């Protein structure tokens, strides 16, 4: 296990991690995201997008494997 950790330490750190952490500690951002979510239902869009992607995946699988059956 220590060998794996040593190998992972050879990779550079995430350059975006500090930016994401600073956003998560910003109280004003949370307030404005709440207002934004009131007008644009992001969670609903994410649910619809995930259902659409699953349908497209099922269609493509059916399109590829349907010819072989």
Image (spheres, helix red, strand yellow):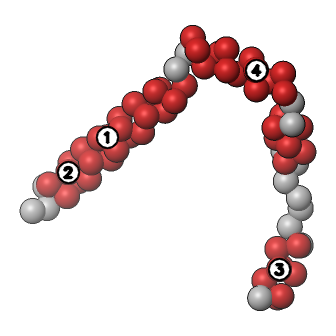
Q: Where is residue 68 in the image (x, y as percent from the top left)?
A: 13, 61
Q: Quadrant of residue 10?
A: bottom right
**Residue closest to the far top:** 39
Disc 4: which residue: 31
Earlier sequence position, callout 3 versus callout 2? 3
Res. 19 visible in picture: no
Q: What element carries label 4?
A: helix
**Vertical position of residue 35 compared to residue 60: above or below:** above
Q: Residue at x 76, y 20 (%)?
A: 31
Q: Earlier in the sequence, mark 3 or mark 4?
A: 3
* Residue underneath mark 2: 62
Residue in view at x 84 percent, y 27 percent? 27
Decide which of tag 1 and tag 2 comes sooner along the chain: 1
Q: Distance between the residues labelled 1 and 2?
A: 10 Å
Q: Distance between the residues labelled 3 and 4?
A: 38 Å
43 or 27: nearer the viewer = 27
Say which residue label 1 marks. 56
Name the foreground residue: 2 vs 69: 2
Vertical arrangement, residue 8 with respect to residue 25, above or below: below
**Residue drawn at x 87%, y 81% as measured from the top left:** 6
């Amino acid at each position: 296990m220590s060998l794996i950790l040593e190998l992972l330490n050879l990779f550079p750190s995430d350059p975006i991690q500090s930016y994401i952490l600073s956003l998560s500690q910003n109280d004003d951002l949370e307030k404005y995201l709440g207002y934004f979510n009131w007008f644009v239902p992001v969670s609903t869009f994410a649910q619809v997008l995930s259902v659409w992607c699953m349908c497209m995946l099922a269609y493509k699988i059916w399109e590829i494997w349907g010819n072989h059956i």
